[in-house]
Image: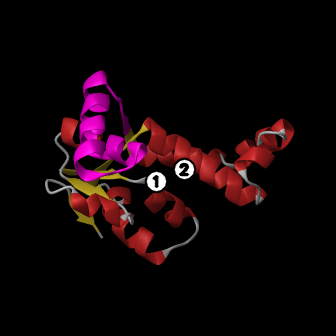
Amino acid sequence: MSSVCIDSNVIVKYYTGDMEAKRVLEPVLNGDVTGFIYNIVFSEVVFVLLKLLTDMKAYELKKKPELIKETIRRLDKQIAFLREYFIELEISEDVKQTALEITKQYGLLPNDALIAATCKHYNIDTLITFDEDFKRIPWLKVVP
């Protein structure tokens, strides 16, 4: 079975009903392809969903812990979906160092460089993302 890493933007678009996101995730959801994420992708997805459900910016949300608690309870299905369909990969010191090198060489932002470095570390050559910046990485196949 082949493997892919998935960027947070694809998962968020999937949750919002984006047809292209549904199409590119279909092989993962059907079990034909193994989907991997790393912990920051998990965190980004949950954070963006919190902001979408509350229609608030981060600095507004952090002042409303009760709203955060209430909203996170509403995300139980989405969080279960993340855990069911995507295997979470660990970030080692080697991955962090590789990410810094990727940032220096290809000009990716740190979280994106961590995604690329995670793919490289775990020998995953395909990334499902809507972020065009990853196309600068010559050893990474970007889908769609």
Q: Residues within 10 Å of mark 1 (few under 14, many from 20)?
A: many
Instruction: Answer whether labels 2 and 1 touch (C-beta < 8 Å).
Output: yes
Write the residue at 83% across / 39% down: 63
**Closer to us: 44 or 107:** 107
Q: Residues within 10 Å of mark 2 (few under 14, many from 20)?
A: many
Where residue 43 sits in the image (x, y, percent)?
A: 54, 41
Question: Is 135 placed left or right of 6 in the picture?
Answer: left
Depicted 113 relative to depicted 54: above or below:
above
Residue 5 seen in render: yes
**Amino acid marked by disc 2:** Val
Q: Which mark is residue 8?
A: 1
Q: Name the residue tied to disc 2.
A: 45
Where residue 51 sits in the image (x, y, percent)?
A: 69, 54
Where residue 125 sits in the image (x, y, percent)?
A: 18, 51
**Closer to us: 118 or 36:** 118
Total residue callouts: 2
Of label 2 and label 1, which has the lower sequence position? 1
Question: Is 100 placed left or right of 84 in the picture?
Answer: left
Write the residue at 32% across / 30% down: 96
Residue 6: in magenta span? no
Question: Is 47 placed left or right of 88 in the picture?
Answer: right
Helix, strand or loop status at disc 2: helix
Residue 26 seen in render: no
Secondary structure mostly seen in the magenta stretch: helix
Where residue 8 sits in the image (x, y, percent)?
A: 46, 53
Write the residue at 51% across / 49% down: 81
**Amino acid marked by disc 1:** Ser
Q: Magenta segment range?
A: 88-117
The figure's colour scheme reads secondary structure
Which quadrant does the C terminus fall into?
bottom left
Write the residue at 19% across / 55% down: 140
User: Label 2 to label 1, Cα distance in Å?
Assistant: 6 Å
